Image: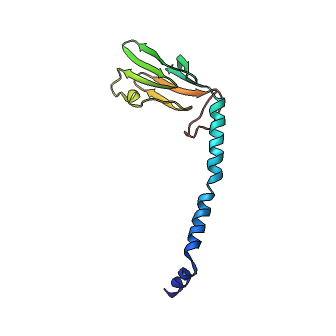
Amino acid sequence: MAKSNKYLKMIRPWDVIIVLALMLASFIPYVVFARQQAKAQAADQVLTAVVTHDGKEVYHIQLTGHHGVSKFRFKNGNEYNEVVATNEQIEISDADCPDQLCVKKGKIERAGQTIVCLPHKLLVEIKSSKAANTGAGGMVTE
């Protein structure tokens, strides 16, 4: 017990403050470079939303620079999904599937994000014009 008190007496308040300040300062380069990289990627890439049914493309729309509202209604027999692009976001606003998970997903806007309607075999995904690390953990295709 006496040994631990000896070491605690060696640590001064300013030592703790200096160590914490250095630890915080070590993250500055990460923040600076992450911001620069995000700005460069956002300026270069063009995002496109692609709607596929059972692996076949049925609709696509460019989201980068899109203004207003664009609607697409996918019908397959008695099944339907209403896909709505609002400005630079896209969502499935209405569907007649029993679980409504695709509607509950909400709007997506970044490369690599997807909305899936499993009962109707419908997939809405955002693709980038260039491969980029989106931070979403998914693969982005050109």
Q: Looking at the image, is 16 positioned above or below residue 88?
A: below
| Outermost residue to the top | 77
Q: Looking at the image, is 106 positioned above or below residue 19?
A: above
Residue drawn at point x = 63 percent, y = 50 percent: 30
Quadrant location, the C terminus: top right
Q: Which of 13 and 110 is in front in this view?
A: 13
Q: Which colour scheme is used?
A: rainbow
Residue 114 position, x and y percent, is 50, 30
Q: Which of 24 and 139 is in front in this view?
A: 24
Residue 86 position, x and y percent, is 47, 22
Residue drawn at point x = 48 percent, y = 21 percent: 85
Residue drawn at point x = 59 percent, y = 37 percent: 134
Q: Looking at the image, is 7 positioned above or below residue 137?
A: below
Q: How many labels does the image show?
A: 0
Residue drawn at point x = 57 percent, y = 40 percent: 135
Residue 36 in the figure: left or right of residue 124: right
Residue 138 position, x and y percent, is 56, 37
Residue 106 position, x and y percent, is 42, 30
Q: Which of 78 and 2 is in front in this view?
A: 2
Residue 36 in the figure: left or right of residue 11: right
| Outermost residue to the left | 98
| Outermost residue to the bottom | 2
Q: Looking at the image, is 99 positioned above or below residue 27?
A: above
